[in-house]
Image (tube, grey):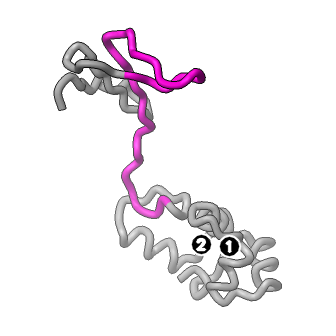
């Protein structure tokens, strides 16, 4: 894309920084609280959060392979991962437990134990 340069990210940074040189465009506008306004700066710098590659992100895990996710499921998910999944898919934990055929008393017991059993994790 013309006029867009990606700056090298700083070591340890979790953001990508892109610069757009507006001289190559006829007119650019931005949204302000008063509505659209013409852009006066020649260089725009935008920061984007870096998407972390990996498996198991919806569970709050950072694993390197599908096999790693399967191994974690077989070992039994932590309740922290279960809650993370429920937040990622926007379903309350009690309702998600119902979909997984986990009774409410069993869910309460697993919360105390801190971990789901293998059959419940799968």
> Is there a contact, CB below 8 Å, between mark 1 and mark 2?
yes
Which sits in the foreground, 87 or 46?
46
The residue positioned 37% from the left and 72% from the top of the image is 67
Q: Is residue 78 magenta?
A: no
Residue at (74% x, 76% y) in the render = 94
Q: Which residue lies furthest to the left in this view?
A: 2
> Picture coordinates of residue 20 (x, y %)?
29, 21
Up-down relation of residue 4 to residue 55 (above or below): above
User: Is disc 2 surrounded by few (<14), some (14 to 19) or many (20+) residues within 10 Å?
Assistant: many
User: What's the residue at 63%, 85% (across, down)?
Assistant: 99
The residue pinned by badge 2 equals 77
Image coordinates of residue 120 in percent, x first then y, are: 61, 84
- Where 21 sits versus 88, above or below? above
Mark 1 / mark 2, whichever is N-terminal: 2
Q: Name the residue under label 1.
A: 115
Disc 1 packing (10 Å; few <14; some 14–19; many ≥20): many
Relative to 49, does residue 113 appear above or below in the rendering?
A: below
């Amino acid at each position: 894309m013309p006029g867009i340069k990606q700056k090298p990210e700083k070591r340890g940074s979790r953001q990508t920084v892109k610069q757009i040189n507006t001289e190559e465009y006829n007119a650019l506008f931005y949204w302000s609280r008063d509505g659209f306004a013409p852009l006066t700066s020649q260089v725009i710098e935008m920061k984007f959060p870096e998407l972390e590659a990996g498996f198991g992100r919806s569970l709050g895990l950072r694993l390197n392979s599908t096999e790693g996710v399967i191994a974690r499921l077989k070992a039994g998910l932590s309740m922290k991962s279960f809650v993370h999944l429920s937040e990622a898919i926007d379903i309350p934990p009690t309702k998600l437990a119902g979909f997984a055929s986990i009774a409410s008393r069993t869910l309460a017991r697993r919360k105390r134990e801190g971990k789901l059993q293998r059959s419940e994790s799968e």
